[in-house]
Amino acid sequence: MRSLLVAKLGCLLGLLVLPLLCGLLPVRLRGAGTRGRWRSFVGCVAGGIFLAACLLDIVPDSLSDMREELRRQRITVDFPFPEFVLTLGFLLVLIIEHVVLDCSEQRAGEATPLLSCGETTPQPAGTGEWVVETGVPHLPADFRVHSSFRSFVLFLSLSVHSLFEGLAVGLQDTESKVLQICIAILVHKSVIAVGLSLLLLQSQVPTRWFVALIGTFALMSPLGIAVGIVMMQNPGPGSTMAQCLLEGIAAGTFVYITFLEILPHELNSPKCRLPKVLSMLLGFSVMAALRFLG
């Protein structure tokens, strides 16, 4: 029993350090190197990573866990309940975002970016895109609009997912299972940390908030392990169902961010369409390969 606890604590440390280092690594891209085509290409790689994470990992896992829990509790309903919970998460972000936008428009009298760098004046660009005059190099208008809110929602949904991944490690009762699951999560979460970091950099989050968000994301899996260790000592009724519901809602928020923020944001520019698609396929392939091997 003592060796099992030591193994879990070792996994806790590993799941904190490596994703933190991987998440902070792309911070070197902040500055001149983050502007222009290079930033767009790495953003497409991140988009591919999140596309694979959404369709091959988070959504299938949440639906499977919910169905398994319904079967375990012998609950039968003639209604797609797991999909309904996922849709609730999608609608939750949709409603919150539009309420925020509506309040912002009423205060300002016009749509105002949630992440503002100064006075903004839309002007037509020579390539057919609209750009924003902010005192910094011109960027597509939708590059800034609402990015801080959506980046925070992305961070929140990934953090909830990471918490439950760590919880799965903490609830195991053998060392071999602990190590097997931990290694899979470690590789998976490190790649996700890089993708999240790239998206936060594109949103131009202030450095202190960038470090705080990446640090919090890295802390979620270790926190889940700690909660799992405590739950093994004091199991509570209904805790698994509550976990499945939260995981389903988090999956719905991830679907919203992936398909209404990340992919349109990266692919709406007419410049370098094919290289961008290839970059997205690269990120997707990396995550698909990890999922296949795991």
Image: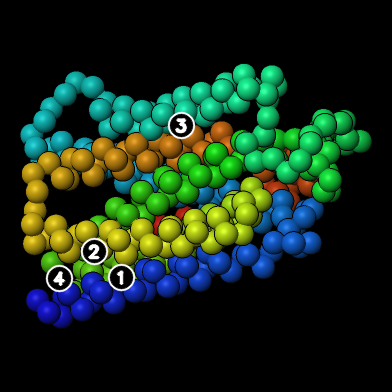
The residue under label 3 is 93
Dot 1 amino acid type: Leu
Instruction: Find numbered disc 4 in the image and state the secondary structure of the residue it sits on.
Output: loop
Looking at the rendering, which quadrant does residue 117 occupy? top right
Residue 38: x %, y % from top left: 75, 57
Residue 193: x %, y % from top left: 49, 60
Indicate which disc, 1 or 3, sits on the residue closer to the N terminus. 1
Q: Residue furthest right?
A: 126
The residue under label 1 is 12
Indicate which disc, 4 or 3, sits on the residue closer to the N terminus. 3
**Quarter of the picture holding the N terminus:** bottom left
Give me the residue at 70% from left, 35% from top. 142
Give the crowd class for mark 4: few <14, some 14-19, many >=20 residues within 10 Å: some
Of badges 4 and 3, nearer the viewer stands 3
Of badges 2 and 4, nearer the viewer stands 2
Q: Are marks 1 and 3 in contact (CB under 8 Å)?
A: no
Instruction: Find numbered disc 3 in the image and state the secondary structure of the residue it sits on.
Output: helix
Indicate which disc, 1 or 2, sits on the residue closer to the N terminus. 1
The residue under label 2 is 226
Q: CA distance from mark 1 to mark 2?
A: 8 Å
The residue under label 4 is 174
**Quarter of the picture holding the C terminus:** bottom left
